[in-house]
Image (tube, grey):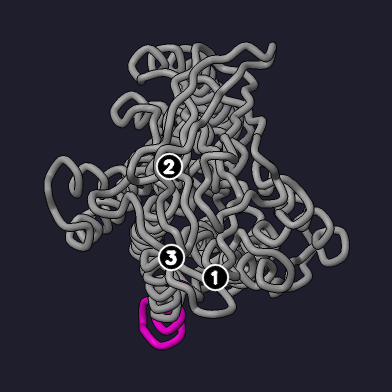
């Protein structure tokens, strides 16, 4: 009988399988076990991320066509410029190759290895009325491993487009900046909604942009579907991939109580894995949608736009307005805002938080897909296009105010305009640096962002 209290003391808590009493009675041992599981998960994901960074790139580079340079020579009035001689030299001044632009103004040169190269066009081959812009007849660019680097030349044909000078060039860059900012906003709104409802800083969001553009390209080029229907199907796939992200990865991690730092590491590893998987499947070259390789810009007086650029602006404005109406007028939109403001209070009010979060992930995936298709329409589909836009998306979200969809829209527009207009001063090859410098300045002056509220962190 003397051992009965010991048995009760040892085995008494076991009959209680779950419930509030077990949560209240959790001691340091349980916390230590949970901490070990979280640490083990973090180390596992860090190892996978390192493995992807070291092993997968080598496999991917063996599968793609290698490194290269590409570009399109055209102007608003003259259209594609054919038979323009393009010469590429390496860092030592040795000639790598010499080609001529085709009937679409496009040229491509394969380079032997990653590094710095100088691209020069023969100004004597330019037709009458077409002149070189302020950048001159040569560009020095750096080609990364497994990457085909686009090269742009400023050409003027007397219109007020990008090749013109003075106020006409400023207006043209302003319009281009609005278009670029709207494309960033398409993806950044989903990133902001995900952060607002889950607190997750998702570094894999850029890969949702790439996957959407690549799926649309395969359906359009290999499947023979018109781009409109290919985009609709890609939106469904993008929404499904976003929802699957939450169901397979993030919801189980939330239920395990995984911290935000560990989740951040998971998103980085997922980003690396998806990015190089796309490179293996899609390849390293920039590819265009069927029938949209080359379009002549239409002169609107103060500026000029290609039809695809004008359609991109219209689609972006319409979709972003629909998202704003959804957030303000619909039941699911109000539930999303409630979960973003206070998840516990929303759950106690009868809102199914998990259902709202999976809807946010699906919506974010669909918006990222549409943004990827529109970016691919103007700049070509590339395996790392989403990753190159990721920092600008973060800049737009942070600049506008963390967790607010409207802040992401405003911040993305500011970043897009600033990036394009900054090419008046800095080379276009490093124009993305301007957006990051703007972010730093604004955060020093107003840390909460343009539309964000001042809160205490920590």
SS class of the residue under badge 2?
helix
Crowd band around label 3 with a 10 angstrom C-alpha radius: few (<14), some (14–19), many (20+): many
In this rendering, position of residue 96 left or right of residue 131: left
Distance from the alpha carbon under mark 3 to that under mark 1: 32 Å
Answer above or below: position of 24 versus 186: above
Which residue is tagged 2?
207
Where is residue 50? Give x, y as percent.
54, 18
Verify whether residue 327 appears in magenta.
Answer: yes
- Is residue 227 in view? yes
Verify whether residue 405 appears in magenta.
Answer: no
Question: Nearer the viewer's eye, disc 2 or disc 1?
Answer: 2
Distance from the alpha carbon under mark 2 to that under mark 3: 30 Å
The answer to whether mark 3 and mark 1 are in CB contact below 8 A is no
Point out the stretch of residues depicted in magenta: 324-336
Q: Residue at x 19, y 44 (%)?
A: 221
Which residue is tagged 1?
405
Magenta stretch, main secondary structure, is helix
Question: Nearer the viewer's eye, disc 3 or disc 1?
Answer: 3
Looking at the image, is mark 3 or mark 1 earlier in the sequence? 3
Where is residue 22? Give x, y as percent.
48, 45
SS class of the residue under badge 3?
loop
Which residue is tagged 3?
297
Question: Nearer the viewer's eye, disc 2 or disc 3?
Answer: 3
In this rendering, position of residue 112 left or right of residue 351: right
Q: Residue at x 20, y 55 (%)?
A: 230
Answer above or below: position of 80 versus 448: above
- Is residue 358 in view? no
């Amino acid at each position: 009988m003397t051992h009965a209290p010991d048995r009760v003391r040892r085995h008494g808590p076991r009959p209680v399988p779950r419930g509030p009493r077990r949560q209240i009675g959790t001691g340091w041992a349980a916390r230590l076990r949970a901490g070990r599981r979280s640490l083990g998960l973090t180390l596992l994901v860090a190892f996978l991320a390192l493995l992807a960074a070291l092993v997968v790139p080598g496999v991917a580079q063996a599968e793609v066509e290698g490194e290269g340079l590409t570009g399109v020579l055209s102007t608003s009035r003259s259209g594609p410029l054919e038979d323009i001689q393009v010469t590429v030299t390496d860092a030592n001044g040795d000639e790598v190759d010499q080609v001529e632009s085709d009937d679409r103004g496009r040229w491509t040169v394969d380079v032997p290895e990653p590094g710095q190269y100088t691209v020069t066009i023969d100004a004597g081959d330019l037709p009458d009325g077409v002149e070189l812009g302020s950048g001159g007849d040569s560009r020095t660019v750096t080609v990364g491993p497994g990457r085909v680097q686009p090269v742009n030349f400023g050409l003027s044909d007397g219109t007020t487009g990008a090749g013109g000078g003075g106020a006409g060039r400023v207006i043209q860059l302003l319009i281009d900046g609005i278009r670029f900012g709207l494309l960033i906003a398409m993806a950044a709104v989903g990133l902001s909604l995900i952060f607002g409802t889950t607190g997750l800083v998702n570094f894999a969001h850029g890969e949702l942009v790439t996957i959407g553009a690549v799926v649309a390209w395969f359906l359009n080029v290999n499947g023979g579907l018109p781009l409109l229907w290919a985009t609709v199907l890609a939106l469904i796939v993008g929404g499904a991939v976003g929802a699957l992200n939450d169901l397979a990865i993030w919801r189980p991690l939330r239920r395990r109580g995984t911290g935000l730092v560990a989740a951040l590491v998971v998103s980085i590893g997922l980003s690396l894995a998806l990015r190089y998987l796309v490179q293996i499947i899609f390849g390293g070259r920039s590819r265009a949608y069927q029938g949209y390789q080359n379009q002549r810009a239409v002169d609107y007086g103060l500026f000029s736009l290609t039809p695809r650029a004008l359609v991109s602006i219209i689609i972006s404005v319409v979709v972003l307005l629909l998202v704003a109406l959804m957030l303000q007028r619909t039941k699911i939109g109000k539930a999303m805002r409630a979960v973003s403001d206070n998840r516990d209070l929303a759950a106690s009010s009868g809102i199914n938080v998990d259902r709202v979060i999976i809807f946010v992930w699906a919506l974010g995936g669909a918006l990222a897909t549409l943004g990827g298709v529109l970016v691919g329409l103007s700049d070509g589909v590339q395996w790392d296009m989403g990753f190159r836009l990721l920092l600008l998306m973060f800049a737009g979200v942070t600049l506008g105010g963390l967790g607010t969809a409207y802040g992401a829209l405003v911040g993305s527009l500011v970043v897009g305009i600033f990036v394009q207009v900054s090419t008046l001063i800095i080379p276009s090859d490093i124009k993305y640096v301007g957006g990051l410098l703007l972010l730093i300045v604004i955060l020093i002056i107003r840390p909460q962002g343009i539309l964000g509220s001042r809160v205490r962190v920590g």
